[in-house]
């Protein structure tokens, strides 16, 4: 799951009988011949990795490795000598967070990407997968959005700082492939959700924000929940476990210059999403829409036909994923 650098966790899984591959939702690094180190094992994510065939897991906290610190990142690569890297560490957030902290969203993400990609190359990493974001595409891109739509129109203004940084990461991978022949690829997930998401009341994305607001409203007994916008924008969502599958699939099956979209292929309006979250949470009050607030991009459905053509499709429905996510929220987030 994408998370802010303050919450970065680093996982290093190794699978038997295949190349050692890293997998997680921050920075994932895997070194050959490493010894298993578990700190602290997260019950939710570890079984999923074992299910995919990874048995040797190295976990790092942000206090162990700050990805914005160039010397620390370089020292880590020099010491661990990883073979494969998955880079998903990022500072992320919704419309409010992007509007409030534009400098952080561009600077922190550029620092993370530059530090990790350059150190990975210089220290002999075999392959790197960089995770971007669907917000890189123009506000009025053709729908569904093909990979070729990148840089063909103006950004959505509510997240342009983050988008610019993520595009720089994609282009950095392409530049290192062109200049050095290094196997660096980029995948562009659609909107992600699931256990371990960021449920911050102000800085989270729309789905976890709705989960938290409806839950708190149910617990406190309030009569209504107010949501920004008109509810009309269309969005696509992908469960984090489906992304985990896709990441491993791409590491094994894809080595190309172009980035690859990773989506569910299904879209819902924000209003439909809010009603579904309300139902899953069990909130019985009213849902009010504040049309004076921005909607963001009117529609964002990615064309994932390239990935489907390679042989990968998602497995988790939105309803099932929401039930799974809410269960984790109730059991793990302090009320």
Image (spheres, helix red, strand yellow):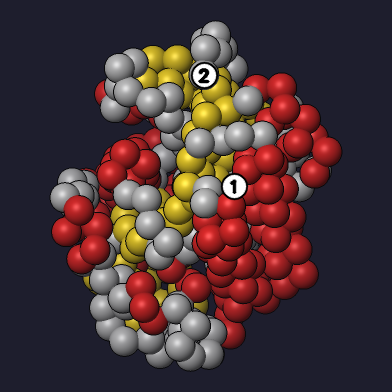
Using the image, determine if residue 36 lies above or below residue 190: above
Q: Nearer the viewer, residue 113 or 182?
A: 182
Residue at 31% from the left image edge and 76% from the top image edge: 146
Q: Nearer the viewer, residue 273 or 306?
A: 306
**Picture disc at residue 32:** 2
**Picture disc at residue 239:** none
Q: Is residue 202 visible?
A: yes
Q: Nearer the viewer, residue 202 or 128?
A: 128
View extreme (top): residue: 35
The CA distance from mark 2 to mark 1 is: 22 Å
The part of the image, by quadrant, that contains residue 63 is: top right
Q: Is residue 156 left or right of residue 269?
A: right
For label 1, the residue is 89
**Residue 243's x, y, as percent?**
34, 47
**Residue 325's x, y, as percent?**
36, 43
**SS for tag 1?**
loop
Q: Is residue 209 visible?
A: no
Of label 2 and label 1, which has the lower sequence position? 2
Residue at 70% from the left image edge and 67% from the top image edge: 106
Residue at 70% from the left image edge and 60% from the top image edge: 110
**Residue 28's x, y, as percent?**
53, 35
Q: How many numbered tags mark residues here?
A: 2
Label 1 CA crowd tier, 10 Å (few <14, some 14–19, many 20+)? many
Q: Is residue 186 left or right of residue 31?
A: left
Residue at 38% from the left image edge and 26% from the top image edge: 19
Q: Is residue 4 left or right of residue 14?
A: right
**Residue 314's x, y, as percent?**
21, 50
Q: Nearer the viewer, mark 2 or mark 1?
A: 2
Using the image, determine if residue 117 lies above or below residue 53: below
Q: Is residue 223 left or right of residue 121?
A: left
The part of the image, by quadrant, that contains residue 82 is: top right
**SS for tag 2?**
loop
């Amino acid at each position: 799951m994408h998370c802010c650098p303050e919450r970065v966790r680093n996982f290093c899984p190794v699978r038997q009988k295949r190349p050692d591959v890293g997998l997680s939702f921050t920075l994932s690094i895997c070194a050959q011949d490493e010894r298993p180190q578990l700190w602290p094992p997260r019950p939710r994510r570890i079984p999923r990795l074992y299910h995919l065939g990874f048995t040797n897991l190295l976990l790092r906290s942000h206090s162990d490795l700050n990805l914005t610190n160039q010397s620390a990142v370089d020292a880590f690569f020099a010491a661990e000598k990883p073979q494969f890297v998955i880079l998903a560490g990022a500072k992320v957030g919704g419309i409010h967070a992007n509007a409030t902290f534009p400098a952080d969203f561009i600077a922190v993400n550029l620092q993370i990407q530059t530090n990790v990609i350059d150190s990975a190359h210089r220290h002999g990493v075999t392959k790197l997968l960089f995770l971007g974001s669907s917000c890189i595409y123009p506000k009025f891109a053709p729908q569904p959005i093909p990979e070729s739509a990148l840089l063909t129109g103006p950004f959505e203004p509510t997240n342009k700082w983050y988008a610019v940084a993520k595009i720089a990461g994609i282009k950095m991978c392409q530049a290192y492939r062109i200049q050095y022949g290094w196997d660096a690829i980029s995948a562009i997930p659609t909107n992600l959700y699931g256990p371990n998401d960021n449920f911050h009341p102000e800085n989270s994305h729309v789905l976890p924000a709705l989960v938290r607001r409806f839950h708190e409203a149910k617990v406190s007994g309030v009569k209504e929940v107010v949501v920004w916008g008109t509810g009309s924008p269309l969005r696509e969502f992908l469960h984090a476990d489906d992304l985990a599958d896709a990441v491993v699939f791409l590491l094994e099956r894809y080595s190309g210059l172009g980035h690859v979209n990773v989506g569910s292929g299904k879209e819902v309006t924000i209003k439909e999403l809010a009603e579904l979250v309300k139902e899953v949470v069990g909130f019985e009050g009213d849902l009010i829409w504040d049309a004076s607030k921005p909607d963001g991009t009117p529609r964002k459905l990615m064309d994932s036909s390239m990935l489907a053509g390679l042989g990968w499709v998602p497995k988790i429905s939105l309803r099932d994923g929401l039930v799974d996510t809410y269960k984790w929220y109730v059991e793990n987030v302090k009320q």
